[in-house]
């Protein structure tokens, strides 16, 4: 029923190399342009191709440690 024969194909930029990627079924690695770029991006957090299990460290995350900055009012 839906014939996607529109000329305006939505495109995105590959997060890795900024190449333009058509947002369509064909582009299976979207938003990446290729598997390579996808892996590169994955590598940034996964360090190579190892799948790192979710680390659940001790939760000593204190809000107090964060500097609570008030939104600067009146500052341009
Ligand atoms: Zn790319």
Image: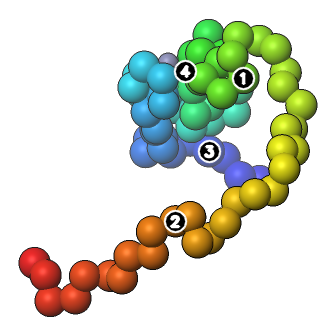
Q: Relative to residue 49, is residue 72 depicted above or below?
A: below
Mark 3 — residue? 4
Of mark 2 and mark 4, the one earlier in the sequence is 4
Residue 53 in percent (x, y) is at 89, 31
Earlier in the chain: of badge 4 and badge 1, it is 4
Judge by depth and name the residue closer to the eye, 36 or 47.
47
Disc 4/disc 1 C-alpha distance (Å): 19 Å
Viewer-proximal residue among 63 and 26: 63
| Alpha-carbon span between mark 3 and mark 1 | 36 Å
Task: Please tell me whether mark 1 sits on a helix, a strand or a loop.
Answer: helix
Ligand 1 lies under 8 Å from the Cβ of mark 2: no
Give residue 33's mark.
Answer: 4
Is residue 50 found left or right of 4 in the rendered image?
Answer: right
Question: Could you tell me which residue is drawn at 48 percent across and 23 percent down?
Answer: 16
Residue indicated by mark 1: 46
Q: Which mark is residue 66?
A: 2
Identify the mark nearer the N-term, 2 or 1: 1
Residue 9 point in image, percent of width and height: 48, 41
Pick the front one: 48 or 41: 48
Please give the name of the residue rendered at 82% of the width and 14% of the height, measured from the top-left corner. 50
Q: Are marks 2 and 4 in contact (CB under 8 Å)?
A: no
Q: CA distance from mark 3 to mark 2?
A: 49 Å
């Amino acid at each position: 029923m839906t014939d996607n024969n529109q000329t305006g194909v939505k495109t995105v930029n590959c997060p890795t190399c900024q190449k333009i990627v058509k947002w369509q079924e064909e582009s299976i690695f979207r938003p990446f342009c290729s598997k390579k770029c996808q892996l590169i991006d994955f590598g940034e957090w996964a360090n190579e191709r190892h799948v790192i299990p979710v680390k659940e460290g001790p939760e000593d995350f204190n809000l107090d440690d964060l500097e609570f900055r008030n939104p600067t009012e009146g500052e341009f």
